[in-house]
Amino acid sequence: MKKPIRIAIAEDHLLLRETLVRFFKSESSINVILDVGNGAELLSAIKNLKIEIVLLDIRMPVLDGWQALNILNERHPEIRVIIVSMHDSESYIVEGIKKGARGFLCKDCSGETLVDAIHSVHEEGFYFSKKTSKALRSKVVNNEFNDLTVLHESLSERETQIVKFICSGKTNKEIAELMFLSVRTIESHRKNISEKTKCTNVASLVVYAIKNGVHSIE
């Protein structure tokens, strides 16, 4: 039997946060380890806990979701973030993905969708709803990712394969096993990929891969 996915919830509306905590108690595959009311509380508590996924609101006091997401990516890159917000315009969705979120959900989504998103992010690395996919496609087609422009220095065949694995949510260890290489070699390739693409996180690399036909979303 698989261990429950360890999650944290950062949501400033107490009633909604308590509702989510109660909801997940009926989900044996998900364990709420932490629930807090702002980004500062999240960052203070999370360093002492083994959290796998964070459900993160955007509009919060003290330290908002955008700020918290930036710091999480820097300090805890192993933690995957799903933004859950009442603001779900294309600009918000794209900004969240560019900043490193692994999924973006509106607060009016169903409990089933939320559970599916958590499992998808945990197992595959990302959760792209129809609205998220549409927003990403729109920006890619209209060439609005100006900070992720295609560079002249192309990726090698091996680097391209590694990018595909990264986009599908594989860890360095898993990629190393699949490619019969050492973890150190994969880390070296990832550094080269980052330098060539100028992508500083997995989410921005996914956008780069979509733009260049290396990865596709449904």
Image: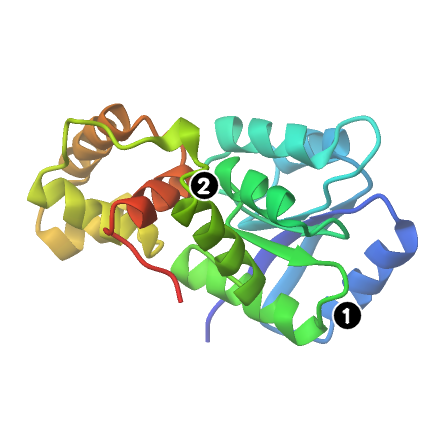
186 relative position to 65: left or right:
left
Q: Residue at x 40, y 49 (%)?
A: 141
Front-most of residues 176 and 163: 163
For disc 2, the marked residue is: 78
208 relative position to 190: left or right:
right
User: Vertically, is 108 above or below 179?
Assistant: below
Residue located farthest toward the right when viewing the structure as drawn? 15
Residue 113: x and y, percent? 63, 71
Q: Amino acid at mark 1?
A: Phe
Disc count in the image? 2
Q: Can see residue 4?
A: no
User: Vertically, is 60 above or below 15?
Assistant: above
Q: Residues within 10 Å of mark 2 (few under 14, many from 20)?
A: few
Front-most of residues 206 and 210: 210
Q: Quadrant of residue 15?
A: bottom right
Front-most of residues 210 and 24: 210
Q: Quadrant of residue 200?
A: top left
Q: Secondary structure at mark 1?
A: helix
Q: Amino acid at mark 2?
A: Glu
CA separation in Å, label 1 and label 2: 25 Å
Q: Earlier in the sequence, mark 1 or mark 2?
A: 1
Residue 82: x and y, percent? 59, 51
Q: Residue at x 43, y 35 (%)?
A: 145
For disc 1, the marked residue is: 23
Q: Residue at x 40, y 40 (%)?
A: 143
Q: Secondary structure at mark 2?
A: loop
**What label does residue 53 carry, if any?**
none
Residue 118: x and y, percent? 56, 62
